[in-house]
Amino acid sequence: MKFAYFSDPISFKLVFMRQKYLDSLRENGWISENQSSAIQTWENEKPFSLHWELRTILYVGILLVTSGLGIIIYQNIDTIGHTAIITLIAIACSACFFYCFTHKLPYSNQQVKHASPWFDYVLLLGCLLFLALEGYLQYQYQVFGVRYGIATLLPAILFFFLAYYFDHAGVLSMGIAAMASFFGITVSPGMLVNNQLEESPLIYTGLVFAILLIGTAFYFKARSIKRHFTFTYYNFGFNMLFICLLAGCFTLDYPYFYFGLILLAGFLLARYAILEKSFYFLLMTVIYCYIGITWAVTDSGFSNAFGLYYYVFSAIGVIYFLINYKKILKHK
């Protein structure tokens, strides 16, 4: 039997399962040889989805367009001129936003799926061009001066508005990243040139921002406002929360207080992962909690023999989790 190309391992596995059951039905006399051949022919010739392949190509195309624009500007800055470059980027950015505003569907608190397959990518391209325009104006003309916070707050507000108005999770991610930059620059301007994660104000700010993201997602989900954005908020929020708590364990006073918060956050995220049957969040919980527990075992001063046993049995535990995660999530 010839098989077509399948974009994911699950589809490939399902084909073999179907073939196995088909052979069993034919061998037991439930279907005839002609019926089996007809089913095999239908399996071979039926259309298959190129959804993720096309999405990947479009996303790569947008990145190549924006990267190519930056290279052209860099190599021809003396011949093109600043005004012409700014005008070109502004026109392209405006054209993208004009297309989105003229082809949008009415706003809804539920997920909105636009009829045009190009809509999401045009919006994403417009946002990237806006960042390029703002960065160019700041670099060449210092329109914001040394007030870097404004330069990050402006796109953050714009991207949050566009994300909800047009229902785009990718733009929401850009807005969260811009807002995180705003909080970081406001608290510690020196982080632009130095790695200052060990500074307590930056850690505390990261914790507050992470809790704000998680709380926002919980509130909007409870209010049934763009519930599908919950993943994006939790992804940024819990990653930042765990990283800041681990930094607190490593560098701040009262490290076991932060270790306790890691276990608490892990319990809450694991509970959510089980309820939503999310392997990603469950794996995130295991990784961060494992790092925290390993730090606690190492920091507590146990003997080398105990430490050796810990690493052996903890590795066994992680392997057991990876093998049996479907049982934990109650996946069929």
Image: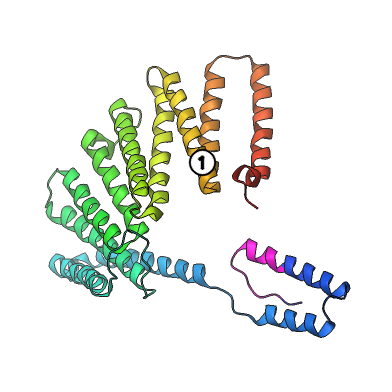
Task: State the residue at coordinates (78%, 72%).
Answer: 22
- Residue 216 appears left or right of 16: left
Q: Quadrant of residue 329?
A: top right
Task: State the residue at coordinates (20%, 69%).
Answer: 94
Task: State the residue at coordinates (41%, 66%).
Answer: 59
Q: Is residue 325 above or below residue 34?
A: above
Q: Nearer the viewer, residue 258 or 251?
A: 258
Element at badge 1? helix
Task: State the residue at coordinates (68%, 44%).
Answer: 323
Q: Position of residue 122 (x, y in %)?
A: 31, 70
- Residue 16 appears left or right of 160: right
Q: Is residue 13 above or below residue 186?
A: below
Q: Nearer the viewer, residue 129 or 2?
A: 2
- Residue 145 appears left or right of 262: left
For label 1, the residue is: 284
Q: Which residues are magenta?
A: 3-15
Quadrant into which the N terminus falls: bottom right
Q: Quadrant of residue 212?
A: top left
Q: Nearer the viewer, residue 166 or 153?
A: 166
224 magenta-colored: no
- Say how many tags the image has: 1
Q: Position of residue 50 (x, y in %)?
A: 53, 73
Q: Position of residue 150 (x, y in %)?
A: 16, 47
Q: Nearer the viewer, residue 39 or 281?
A: 39
- Residue 212 appears left or right of 19: left
Q: Position of residue 221 (x, y in %)?
A: 37, 48
